[in-house]
Image (cartoon, rainbow, N blue to C red):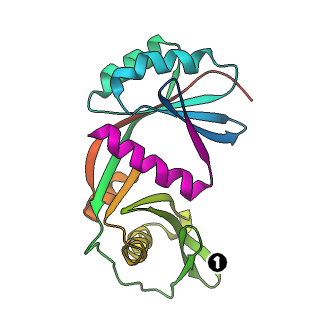
């Protein structure tokens, strides 16, 4: 079950970020092509953690590994045993039925801007300056949220909720029914408040190779 959802999430992620992916020996690998993260390996079954971690650890390039799991302590132990550095041990894989997603009102002189190209983009502006933003890629009936951000000077004003609500509304127009995302520790509270539920824990690690 988790594996299928991970594959669906990954299709939205690469669409949102303009990336490509492939399967290497049955393992899902995304070509991130950044200086500190050349490839990201994504586990669709946490039973593969040890084998994948050893491959990532042996790479001569900066590689990362993301493992959705219901047993994060075991996954962390296997990752560390392979010689990887656990970068983010407590992230969360989440989903939400998008129909009826909350969309709070916007106050305080803020305005919303929506762009629609291959990916839905939402910006919250004040006096022409970006206060919050986010992306959502629709693939079939799934919509994957990506890069949900609020500028520090504009936090605690509900802008993240507005961004998510507008993204969900626009994604539903494109036929999306299910929202998927990988959440940072800081973001979980926001998403839960908006009705998103936990699918699993998420452990993210990297090898010790510099660019």
Q: Do we see residue 185 in this rendering?
A: no
Identify the residue under disc 1: 129
Q: Quadrant of the N terminus?
A: top left
Q: Position of residue 50 (x, y in %)?
A: 42, 16
Chief secondary structure of the magenta portion? helix
Specify the quadrant of the image occupied by residue 69: top left
Q: Is 60 left or right of 156, judged from the image as shown?
A: right
- Is residue 6 on the magenta stretch? yes
Q: Magenta residues, as a range? A: 1-22
Residue in the foreground of this view, choosing between 39 and 196 = 39
Residue beneath the point at 35% across and 60% down: 179
Q: Position of residue 45 (x, y in %)?
A: 35, 29
Q: Position of residue 97 (x, y in %)?
A: 26, 64
Residue beneath the point at 59% across and 55% down: 17
Q: Quadrant of the C terminus?
A: top right
Q: Position of residue 201 (x, y in %)?
A: 32, 38
On screen, 140 above or below 43? below
Q: Is 177 left or right of 53, judged from the image as shown?
A: left
- Could you classify mark 1 by the number of other residues whose Cα lies within 10 Å: few (under 14), some (14-19), or many (20 or more)? few
- Is residue 49 on the magenta stretch? no
Residue beneath the point at 30% across and 68% down: 98
């Amino acid at each position: 079950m988790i594996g299928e959802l991970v594959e669906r999430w990954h299709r939205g992620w690469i669409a949102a970020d303009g990336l490509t992916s492939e399967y290497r020996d049955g393992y899902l690998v995304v070509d991130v092509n950044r200086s500190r993260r050349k490839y990201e390996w994504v586990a669709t079954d946490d039973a593969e953690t040890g084998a994948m971690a050893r491959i990532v650890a042996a790479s001569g390039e900066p590689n990362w590994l993301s493992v959705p799991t219901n047993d994060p302590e075991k996954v962390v132990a296997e990752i560390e045993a392979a010689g990887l550095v656990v970068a983010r041990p407590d992230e969360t894989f989440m989903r939400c039925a998008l129909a009826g997603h909350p969309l709070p009102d916007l106050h305080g002189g803020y305005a919303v801007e929506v762009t629609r190209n291959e990916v839905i983009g939402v910006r919250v502006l004040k006096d022409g300056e970006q206060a919050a933003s986010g992306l959502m890629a629709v693939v079939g009936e799934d919509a994957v949220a990506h890069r949900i951000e609020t500028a520090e000077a504009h936090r605690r004003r509900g802008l993240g909720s507005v961004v998510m609500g507008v993204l969900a509304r626009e994604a539903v127009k494109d036929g999306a029914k299910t929202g998927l995302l990988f959440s940072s520790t800081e973001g979980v509270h926001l998403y839960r408040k908006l009705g998103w539920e936990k699918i699993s824990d998420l452990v993210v690690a990297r090898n010790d190779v510099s660019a």
